Amino acid sequence: NGVQQALKQLVLVEKVPEAEYILQCDYAQLALVENLLQQTAGRILQGEYGAAVVLHLALPATEVELFGNKLRDLSRGNLQLTPISQ
């Protein structure tokens, strides 16, 4: 009986596989990248902020194509994802 009650309270969370990428952009393009990450449930794992911004990104595997296409469209082809081999 206690197990059944615990199972009723259990919260299920769907785990989506992620793919990791490197993206280099200018500071002026950073807001665009952050906006796209929010739209696709992506996240910044690490950022290096020097002359340019270099971001280590994690994207849901199901959203990589959409993110890449929007990124190319909005940046007029200037920004490209570089996959990190795992």
Image: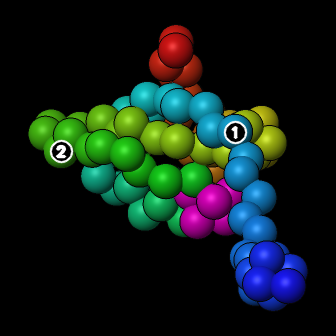
Q: Residues within 10 Å of mark 1 (few under 14, many from 20)?
A: few
Q: Residue furthest front?
A: 1
Q: Nearer the viewer, residue 7 or 55?
A: 7
> What residue would you read off at disc 2?
49
Q: Position of residue 79 (x, y in %)?
A: 52, 34
Q: Quadrant of the N terminus?
A: bottom right
First of labels 1, 2 by sequence position: 1
Q: Amino acid at mark 2?
A: Tyr
The tag on residue 17 is 1
Magenta segment: 37-41
Task: Report the residue at 30% width, 36% height from top.
Answer: 54
Q: CA distance from mark 1 to mark 2?
A: 27 Å
Q: Position of residue 20 (x, y in %)?
A: 53, 31
- Element type where label 1 sits in the image: loop
Position of residue 86 relative to residue 54, above or below, is above
Residue 53 located within the stretch drawn in magenta: no
Task: Report the residue at 27% width, 44% height from top.
Answer: 47
Q: Residue furthest top?
A: 85
Q: Nearer the viewer, residue 28 or 11?
A: 11
